[in-house]
């Protein structure tokens, strides 16, 4: 059963019964969604997946933030508030985003340096925290039926899942608790459903 993310704070988005999030604002900083601070150092939540099923590739950021306020209180839904995340550009390029790196490089240089591949409409991407909570892996789910099994970082195996194709692993210094944040860059952009990943051993 899918463990859908419940968006507790939203700005200029619509959330359909299918859990697809659609942007209503125009431009960066105007459309997004934020979860409760549920990702902790000791907790069972270890990441997320996001389905991008629309025929048009959306321009978005999605990842983890330590933002303490709501989006309305912050006055924006912006990628600058993300600590770590996935960036998908309108031309389908997948890249890694971190606040630390963004402060060191211009955006164009960062995107080129951290490019992880190209997205196709209908793909599902994800981020999974390492078992030691000292980094994470960005992956793409292999298309097709959920068959077979996969092994997680802690050695446990989970059956009935699509294979995770690792795009890159990162080591980072993380602060907890963290929220999940979705930022959409253009009106009509869609993403979702977004689902939590839970450890097989709570």
Image (spheres, grey):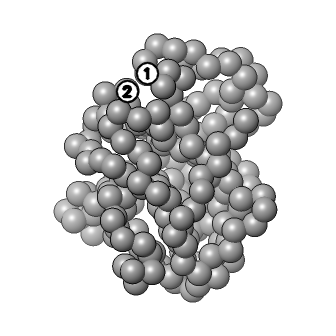
The image shows residue 47 at horizontal and vertical percentages of: 48, 41
The image shows residue 189 at horizontal and vertical percentages of: 65, 72
The image shows residue 20 at horizontal and vertical percentages of: 71, 62
Of 174 and 59, nearer the camera is 174
Of 191 and 65, nearer the camera is 65
The image shows residue 10 at horizontal and vertical percentages of: 55, 73
Left or right: where does residue 130 sit relative to residue 193? Answer: left
Alpha-carbon span between mark 2 and mark 1: 6 Å
Q: Residue at x 46, y 57 (%)?
A: 36
Which element carries disc 2, helix, strand or loop? Answer: loop
Q: Residue at x 37, y 52 (%)?
A: 178
Mark 2–mark 1 CB contact (< 8 Å): yes
Label 2 neighbour load within 10 Å: few <14, some 14-19, many 20+: some
Q: Which mark is residue 59?
A: none
Residue occupied by mark 1: 153
Residue 160 can be seen, yes or no: yes
Determine the image quadrant of residue 132: top left
Residue occupied by mark 2: 131
Q: Residue at x 63, y 37 (%)?
A: 141
């Amino acid at each position: 059963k899918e463990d859908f993310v419940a968006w507790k704070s939203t700005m200029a988005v619509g959330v359909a019964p299918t859990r697809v999030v659609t942007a209503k604002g125009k431009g960066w900083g105007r459309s997004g969604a934020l979860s409760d601070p549920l990702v902790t150092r000791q907790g069972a939540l270890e990441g997320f997946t996001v389905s991008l099923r629309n025929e048009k590739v959306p321009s978005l950021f999605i990842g983890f933030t330590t933002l303490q306020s709501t989006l309305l209180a912050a006055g924006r839904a912006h990628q600058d508030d993300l600590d770590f995340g996935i960036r998908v550009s309108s031309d389908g390029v997948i890249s890694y985003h971190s606040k630390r790196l963004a402060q060191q490089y211009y955006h164009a240089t960062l995107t080129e340096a951290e490019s992880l591949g190209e997205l196709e409409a209908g793909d599902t991407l994800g981020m999974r925290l390492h078992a030691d909570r000292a980094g994470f892996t960005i992956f793409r789910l292999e298309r097709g039926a959920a068959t077979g099994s996969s092994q997680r970082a802690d050695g446990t195996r989970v059956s009935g899942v699509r294979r995770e194709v690792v795009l890159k692993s990162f080591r980072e210094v993380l602060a907890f608790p963290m929220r999940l944040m979705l930022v959409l860059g253009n009106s009509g952009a869609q993403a979702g459903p977004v689902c939590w990943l839970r450890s097989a051993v709570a």
